[in-house]
Image (cartoon, helix red, strand yellow):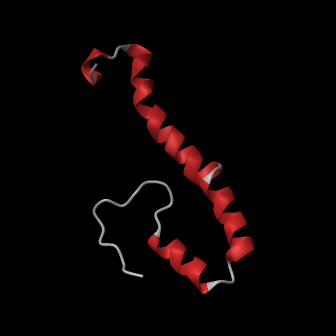
Amino acid sequence: MGISTFEGMNYLAVFSPIFSYLLLVYVSGVRMLEYRGHKKWGHLDEYKEYKQITPKLLPKFFYKSKKL
């Protein structure tokens, strides 16, 4: 199935993954988890370093990883 087969309102299906990503990252999910983590471990240097090197939702395939 390709985009060329879409008709009318079917084009909205293209926005579904984008909308889901935005909801997870900016509305619920990731933000709520980060808030709880910051409250619980925000004072630890290891947690701060972990937050800097760990991607929020999608893995970083094209970035060099920092060695711990």
Which of 12/30 is in front?
30
The relative height of residue 26 versus residue 19 in the rendered view (above or below) is: below
Residue 30 in the figure: left or right of residue 17: right
Q: Where is residue 28 in the image (x, y as percent from the top left)?
A: 65, 49
The relative height of residue 63 versus residue 23 in the rendered view (above or below) is: below
Tally the marks. Answer: 0
> Which residue occupies 28% across, 19% down?
1
Which of 19/52 is in front?
52
> Which residue occupies 36% across, 61% down?
60
Q: What is the quadrant of residue 10 in the picture?
A: top left
Which of 45/11 is in front?
45
Q: What is the quadrant of residue 45 in the picture?
A: bottom right
Q: Position of residue 50 (x, y in %)?
A: 52, 74
> Which residue occupies 68% across, 68% down?
37
Residue 68 in the figure: left or right of residue 49: left
The relative height of residue 12 versus residue 38 in the rendered view (above or below) is: above
Name the image quarter holding the C terminus.
bottom left
Q: Where is residue 34 in the image (x, y as percent from the top left)?
A: 64, 64
Q: Position of residue 58 (x, y in %)?
A: 43, 54
Which of 33/7 is in front?
33
